[in-house]
Amino acid sequence: MDCIFCKIARNEIPSKKIYEDDYMLAFNDINPQAPVHILVIPKQHIPSLDEINTGNSDVIAKIFECIPPIAASAGLINGYRLISNCGSDACQSVGHLHFHILGGRQLPANMA
Ligand code: 5GP
Ligand code: ZN
């Protein structure tokens, strides 16, 4: 599978890992848009939010359970933003579901 995030999950491409378990990986974005910019991915290849279903939503639940402690361990005591770009209108550039955790500064109110 020629997917960059699958390769990161398999350690074929290096990343700065923040958290890892059997189901997910959190690592620093290579092009950070904020002082803290972490990507959280399922290890299994799910292309986007549109492909979440009853067969894989258990992994999504585990990811969401882990996001608050990951944000806390990154020092985001004043809050953070969680984003998942889905499809071309949202400028999704990597076709493997991922959640951006952004924080460490005041973020703009208008995201669009
Ligand atoms: P998207 O635009 O799909 O929502 O977000 C993709 C993100 O993946 C971007 O923020 C981009 O900087 C990040 N990214 C792309 N390739 C790599 C990579 O090889 N390593 C890491 N750590 N991040 C990457
Ligand atoms: Zn993938």
Image: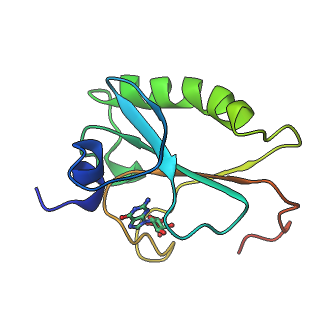
Answer above or below: position of 108 versus 64: below
Q: How many marks?
A: 0
Residue 50 placement (x, y as % from top left): 37, 52
| Residue at the image position 79 percent from the left and 41 percent from the top | 76
Answer above or below: position of 75 versus 83: above
Residue 68 placement (x, y as % from top left): 68, 30
Residue 79 or residue 83, whichever sits in front: 79
Residue 27 placement (x, y as % from top left): 48, 47
Q: Quadrant of the C terminus?
A: bottom right
| Residue at the image position 32 percent from the left and 55 percent from the top | 96
| Ligand 1 sits in quadrant | bottom left
Lateral position of residue 53 relative to residue 7, left or right:
right
Q: Quadrant of residue 2?
A: bottom left
| Residue at the image position 21 percent from the left and 60 percent from the top | 3
Lateral position of residue 28 relative to residue 107, left or right:
left
Q: Quadrant of the N terminus?
A: bottom left
| Residue at the image position 75 percent from the left and 53 percent from the top | 103
Residue 62 or residue 11, whichever sits in front: 11
Residue 53 or residue 80, whichever sits in front: 80
Residue 108 placement (x, y as % from top left): 84, 68
